[in-house]
Each structure stands twice: as structure tokens, then as C-alpha cells.
Image: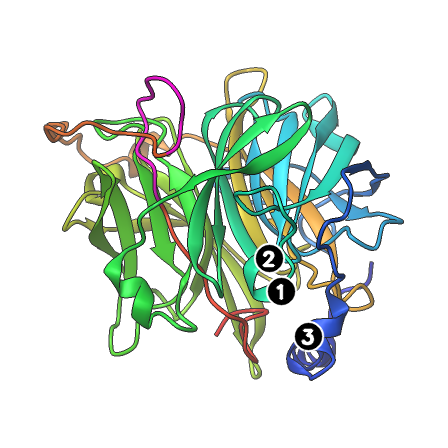
Amino acid sequence: MRAWSFSAVAVAALVAVSPAWAQLKPDTAGIPTQDIEVRATPIASFARSGKPLDNPRLEWRGGLVLTSPSDKFGGWSGLALGADGKSLVAVSDSGVWMTGEIAYDGTRPIAVRSARLGSLQTASGKPLTRQRDRDAEAVTLASGTPKKGTAYIAFEQNDRIGVFALEKGGLGKPTSYVTMPKEAARMRLDGIESVTVLAGGPRKGALIAFAENPLRGEKTHRGWIWVSGEPRGFSVADIGRFSITDAAGLPDGSVLIVERFFRWTEGLKIRLRHLAADGIKPGGIAKGEILLEADTGSEIDNLEALAVSQGERGETVITLMSDDNFNRFLQRTVLLQFTLKNKPAAAAGPSKKTEKAENVRWVCAGCSGAQPYIGVPMTSVQKDLNSVFGS
């Protein structure tokens, strides 16, 4: 696939906000669960020039451009993987879910197999007939795996977070919905489409959400952590007016976020940031190390989905996936994978005392049985002229 020119990016944004834009998304209400074919074309190197990635924290593993004969395939805005990085569940802002398996040749992803696709439902098992109800923007596992477990799915426009069962190769109807932050009422186009569960640390199991952009009149991003079922706020420094599009928890209690930037004069950029665990707490200030920043000289697209898994050697694997907005002539569905390398010893800072855990009990809203999880995240942002690639 040839590199995007600035004009192609501009045309894509125009298409996304034209009156015909709503027609680009397929009507997915009530479609039957079905097997689909997913075709994969390998991406040999992250840089379009073929130059190896020179990054002290990331190692390129491989990537794929994904396509399908199904007109329901696309718009992937959320992704969760099993611990081994093979089983997957993804959600689309058209109102569908997809499950499947990533196949590998050594450490390199080569295919998505056994893919199944179905429509998201109401709590009564009925189809979501309105587009504003189908706009799923994020998914994260609360427990188990994409084959059998529990997932949280965040929707925008009609803002809510549902708790869904994963079983029999698919996604069931929501069993409950979680409490939303009071700020959701004024988010409008600056809502939340990033949710994750803390994978370690004193608040392990807590569900986290991030606002895509600073709220009106504010200069920092909002984050929330749910304590005993109630959202409590913290802040994330804004760097260069990037938008947060997804998040994934790491075993030490820290969080990765993927960020996107688009301006007419500068084009599309993508950034991966690592937020330290000590700031992710009620009233905290989450500070982040930038791991990667890339523009269209690299094999990026509208990256909206982020997941973390473990490789065969125990290494941390980062997977990114893009939302093509069903603009198949101008955008792509790409799946990119990197290994997260340990910070070089010379760059490592002094160790800090481990913060004591708060005396709270984490509860998984809507989950059956005893669970060490809190239940909650949030909403998202309605797309405008720049929301396809950032505000």
C-alpha cells in the first residue's frame, strides 16, 4: 500500500464528515452471528522506507493489513487479547463484535483465523436499531479470556459501559451497565473511548477510563479509576494536543495509552505513551514516558485499539489496530505488534517506595461470583471534522 499523501489524509477527513458519511457504516442491527474470512497482507517493516526500527524501548515484531469480503468488517475501535496474544475480541463503531485467533510464524503475526462476527445487543437480547446506540469504542477484559470470560464495552453518543459475557466463540448480551462519572454530562465531543483494567499493583483489578481530549476549559486530560463502584478522578498531562484513543494495563500497575494527532497543516501522527503507576490513583497526576511517535512515513493509520499480551519468552507484546472508518479506498485496517523492552539501566531512575493500597474492595459490576475487579469505565466522543484523526 502506497504512503498517504497529505491530500489523501485531507480527503479522508472530508469523507468522514460529509452528509454521506453515515451511509458508509453498514446497518448491522440484528445481523446473525457468522463466520467470516479475514485476509492478511504482511507489513515487513514499520518504516515505509524499510529502515529497521531504532527505538530503545520497542522492537518491531511485524504487522498485517487486514481485509475481508464481508461488508461488516471494519471500524475496529477496541481490541482485547488473551494472555498468550492469540485469542482476540474486537468491537466496531458500527455495532458489531469479532472474535478470532492471531496466527504466528515465530514471533511474527501472519494471519487472523477462525473469525466470527455478530451484532451487539440490548440487555433484552434485541438488536440495536439506532446508530447512536451501536457506537462501540472500547473493549477490555474484566476476567477470563476472549473465549470464555467477561468484558467491558464502552459506547459513545448514547454513553454507557456494558458488562458482557464471552462464551461459545462470541459475545452475549449485556448483563448490566456501570456507573458513569458526573463529567459525562458535559463531555460532548471530548468524551471517553479508552478503558482498561489495571493488571498489577495495589489497585489491581480497578477499571480505568480516559477522556479522549481535555474537557472544555481544561488543559489536562481526565482519567477515572473506579473505587467500590464509584468513579474517582485523576489527571493526565496533555502533550502537544494529542487525543487519547485507547489504553492497556501492564503487570506493574502502569498503563500504556495510544494517542492520535491530526491537523490540516501537519497530517496524521500517532504516539505511544507509558503512564507510571504511582499517578494512577484518585486525585493523582499521571505522568508519561513517550515510547514512540510516528507519522505517515511509518505504517500507521487511524490507530484506535490497543492490547497487551505475553510472548513465548515472557516478553510484553503490544498490539495496535486501526479503525478504517469504512473508507476502504483511503484507509486501512492494520494490526501492528511490538515488543516492549526494559528501560536501559542508565536511563532508569531511582526506585520509589511502593505506595500502600487503599483500604477498598474492588467489585466487578455485573460479574457472577467473587471477582477481584471493579466494574466501570466510560463513554466516548462523537466524531467531527478532525475526530477521524484527532481533534
Amino acid type assigned to the residue bearing label 2 in the image: Arg
**Can residue 214 be seen in this snapshot?**
yes
The colour scheme used here is rainbow
Residue linked to disc 2: 134
Label 2 – label 3 distance at C-alpha: 26 Å
Label 1 – label 3 distance at C-alpha: 25 Å
**Can residue 291 be seen in this snapshot?**
no
**Residue 152 on image: x %, y %:** 46, 39
* Residue 313 location, quadrant: top right
Amino acid type assigned to the residue bearing label 1 in the image: Gln
Judged left or right of residue 40, residue 341 is left
Residue linked to disc 3: 9
Quarter of the image that includes the N terminus: bottom right
Q: How many marks?
A: 3
Residue linked to disc 1: 131
User: CB atoms at circles 2 and 1 under 8 Å apart?
Assistant: yes
Q: Earlier in the sequence, mark 1 or mark 3?
A: 3
Of the two numbered discs 2 and 3 in the rendering, the one whose residue sits closer to the viewer: 2
Q: Earlier in the sequence, mark 2 or mark 3?
A: 3
Label 2: which secondary element:
helix
**Residue 232 on image: x %, y %:** 20, 49
Q: Residue at x 66, y 58 (%)?
A: 94
Point out the stretch of residues depicted in magenta.
Answer: 366-376
Front residue of 135 and 390:
135
**Residue 174 on image: x %, y %:** 51, 39
Q: Residue at x 85, y 47 (%)?
A: 68
- In the rendered image, the vertical position of residue 158 relative to residue 377, given as above or below: below
Label 2 – label 1 distance at C-alpha: 5 Å
Magenta-span inclusion, residue 25: no
Few, some or many residues within 10 Å of mark 3 (<14, 14–19, 20+): many
Amino acid type assigned to the residue bearing label 3 in the image: Val
